[in-house]
Image: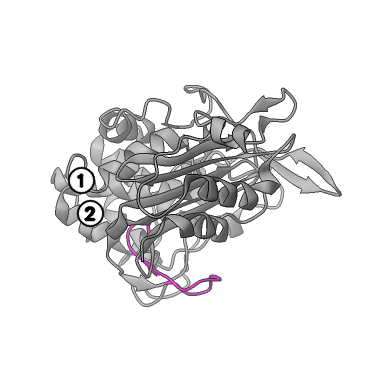
Amino acid sequence: MRLALLFASIFLAGPVHATDAVQNADRLMRKYQGDVPGAALLVLRDGKPLLRRGYGLANLEQHTRVTPGTDFRLASVSKQFIAAAILLLAEDGKLTPDDPVRHWLPSLPAANARVTLRQLLDHTGGLVDYEDLIPPEQTAQLNDQDVLRLLSAAPRSYFAPGSAYRYSNSGYVLLGLVVEKASGRPLQDFLAERIFKPLHMDHTLLYVHDGKSVPERAYGYSRSKGRWLRTDQSLTSATRGDGGIYSNIDDLAKWDTALYDDRLLGDASRKAAFSPHVTVVGEPYEAQYGYGWRITGDTLWHSGESIGFRNVIVRWPKQHLTVILLSNRNEPEPYQTALKIARPFLQP
């Protein structure tokens, strides 16, 4: 127990007992402990860490341990940053959420003529999943332009735009390309200049091949036949807008704090991002969707899954409480674990 307290940062107030909270978290995080792919865990209240620690290894081959400074591939947790970029450009007057996506990306087929940026933000555009369009002989990783070409050659959609919900990585890849068109800047530069640098998220970046290296990188692993195998990259790991950001729990704490005031986004933009626009269907939980955020009861949250990574951020805005769990392994799914870790910290 002394060791757990040594590596945890605890600033608890109210009825929660520090030792009980750490023991509860350590019990729930047992699978991540030891010489196995690990995780970083952060619990925040009012911007202060209640619990902050790493478990397990970021790199099995080098035996590098996970710390609060370890950068994980965020996968779909990245989508909230892409949504914020669109909202920032709307505040700048460079675009509007009701712009047809073909205004910015005219190569898209006529089937997408009525799809708006707003419908891409909340997954109601009906675009075909680009993952299902990848040729079976494909061996090289796809980039965002490859995705645009695949979608431009697919003259169909799943449903009329705005008529249904279907989670869409295609939509967020296109939103990233729209950010570039509207801003005149590469997506990675726009995110750095307008979000990461202003918030002093100094170890966060949108990773691109041959670009800046990830500073303290965790590599992804998958368990197969009783062994952990490095599975850090797949055909879809080089796309950007749907999941290409790397970050750590300390930088994400700065992001979380900025979502409570107008230091980055104005009140109207934050309200738009956090308001329920559509009911989530086809997924194993009850939720509604805003712009880059799921909404369940009093929580705003989003998970992220990529080959070798499973992540989640869950926020209770009314209580100014947040749990962030980042892991470099294909299992277990972290959402329910984060909810259980939060339980001792939640006020009745």
Magenta stretch, main secondary structure, is loop
Q: How is the image coloured?
A: one colour
Q: Quadrant of the C terminus?
A: bottom left
239 over 122 or under it: above or below: above
Q: Secondary structure at mark 1?
A: loop
Residue 138 lies, in percent from the top left, at 67, 45
Disc 2 + disc 1, Cβ < 8 Å: yes
User: Which sits in the foreground, 257 or 154?
Assistant: 257
44 over 319 or under it: above or below: above
Q: Which residue is mark 2?
A: 270
Give left or right: position of 275 versus 336.
Answer: left
Q: Which residue is mark 1?
A: 265
- How far apart are the alpha carbons under marks 2 and 1? 6 Å
Give left or right: position of 70 versus 300.
Answer: right
User: Which sits in the foreground, 172 or 60?
Assistant: 60
For the question of whether residue 334 can be seen, the reply is yes
